[in-house]
Amino acid sequence: MRPVSFVLFHSFRKESVAPMKTKFFYSQKVAPYLFVLPFVLSFLIFWIYPFASTVYMSFHNITTTSSRFVGIQNYQKLLTDKVFQKAMFNSFRYMIWTLVILIPLPMLFAVLINNRLTKAKGFFKSVMYLPALTSVVVAGIIFRLLFSENPVSGMNQFISLFGAGPYKWLKYDATGLVALLILASWRWMGVNMLYFMAGLNAIDTSLYESASIDGANGWQKFRYISLPLLKPTTIYVLTISIYAGLAMFMESYMLWAGNNSPKNIGLTIVGYLYRRGIEQGKFGYASAVGLILLIIALIVNFIQLIISGTFKKEVKQ
């Protein structure tokens, strides 16, 4: 039988430790750090560590069996690498065309669907957004068959209505780009449209009512009310579209059934990184390509934020 003093000591210890634990976790000083800790850990593990590893690898010649420090040789090679320059040109051209198509057209569709005279708005939203739910693998296969050089493919059957013969769509640079842009527009038109619709719904309807009283027509309402107040949404869509355009890979990979399109007409920066790193095992060189892509994307977005006035506004605040 245990002594009374022993029992009293342990009962007192249990009663005192439990409140201390509770007090620690519910402390106003500790609680904020506990809430932030998952984000900090994920940021360190999944961003900082891979980024630091990529920087380290970019200064080394790394293969599956060896690693050797080479300084800036990987970056020097990029300056004279014709295939890398071709991939850069393809990515920038694709990005610019997606900006031209996937910003004004979704904005126009958002305005038309958001109009009070439009019926079945939910139906049009669903139809426009549905392609975004389709896997890029499935979408790429569908469009590969659609633009096939086979006479019975969808596009060849369409041009046959005008007396044109079968065309090798994915063997030429211009038509290959058209196929990529149609695929991108089909998948992302509805997503960007919903962004703009969210921006339109945030605009106070009394502004349109006041404009109607003053005799403004539909174009004037869009020009002087909708367009200026959609600027934050437009900048957001522009930013993510720049990144998506430069980082495009799977669409091209699936459209040409691999990373080896004719004369590299479908090769992108990410595709070139994949070729060098995964296919050829030159991880150091691929790391340099990835860092260059990151720097270019940051510079392009920084420039567009300065041009739009967003960066200056944030600095003043």
Image: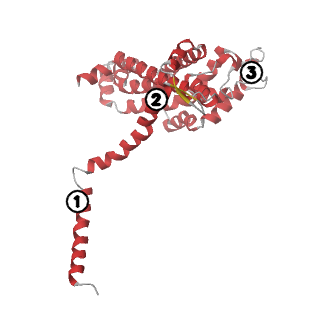
Mark 1 or 3, nearer chain start: 1
Q: What's the residue at 62%, 19% (across, down)?
A: 178
SS at circle 3: helix
Which residue is depicted at the point 57% across and 26% down?
A: 273
Residue 308 appears in the rendering: yes
Q: CA distance from mark 3 to mark 2?
A: 49 Å
User: Are there few (<14), some (14-19), or many (20+) residues within 10 Å of tag 1?
Assistant: few
Mark 2 or mark 1: whose residue is earlier in sequence: 1
Residue on which disc 3 sits: 156
Relative placement, left or right, of 38 versus 60 is left
Q: Which residue is rendered at x = 38% and y = 17% of the image?
A: 303
**Residue under pointer 1:** 23
In the image, is 262 to the left or to the right of 196? Answer: right
Residue 56: x percent and y percent? 46, 29
> Which residue position is annotated with label 2?
56
Of residues 170 and 47, the one drawn nearer to the viewer in this rendering:
47
Q: On the image, which quarter does residue 18 sit in? A: bottom left
Q: Position of residue 297 (x, y in %)?
A: 45, 22
Q: Quadrant of residue 22?
A: bottom left
Q: CA distance from mark 2 to mark 1?
A: 44 Å
Q: Nearer the viewer, residue 266 or 12?
A: 12
> Can the viewer see residue 246?
no
SS label for mark 1? helix
- Give residue 215's position: percent from left, percent from top: 33, 18
- Residue type at tag 2: Tyr
